[in-house]
Amino acid sequence: MKVFVTGASGYVGSAVVRELISAGHQIIGLARSEASAKIISDAGAEVLLGNLENLEVLKKGAAQADGIIHTAFIHDFSQYQKAGEVDRLTINAIGEVIGGMNTTIV
């Protein structure tokens, strides 16, 4: 199974990526920086450069996957409302792609 993971280089996301790879799955990991891309690549996953505010990149990752695990979140708590709105838009963008597809989002 090919799985798109947002937050793939983060604390939770990197653990998810390791578990999925060890179970034999292919991973597309969203990376917002070159440092994050290296972490994802070193784990054995494919890298998709972008961030939660780039909805076209999110849609591209979702379209290539059989499953989606969304672990990313903007942790700037001084702008918590904005972070929540970005998260809502992220989920909606992914949902647009998988509507009607046999894909799972977690």
Image (cartoon, helix red, strand yellow):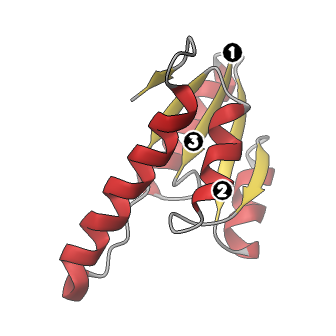
**First-in-chain label (2 vs 1):** 1
- Residue 104, x across and y down, in percent: 47, 20
Label 2 belongs to which residue? 56
Q: Mark 2 against mark 1, which lies toward the viewer?
A: 2
Residue 1 numbered mark, or none = 1
User: Of residues 30 and 55, which is closer to you in this image?
Assistant: 55
Q: Gap in Å between the C-alphas at discs 3 and 1?
A: 12 Å
Residue 105 numbered mark, or none = none
Q: Eyeballing the image, is 69 above or below 53?
A: above
Question: Residue at 44% of width from left, 43% of height from top?
Answer: 70
From this viewpoint, which residue is outermost toward the bottom?
Answer: 78
- Residue 87, x across and y down, in percent: 35, 58
Label 3 belongs to which residue? 5
Q: Gap in Å between the C-alphas at discs 2 and 1?
A: 22 Å
Question: Residue at 64% of width from left, 70% of height from top?
Answer: 32
Query: Which amino acid type is marked by label 2?
Result: Glu
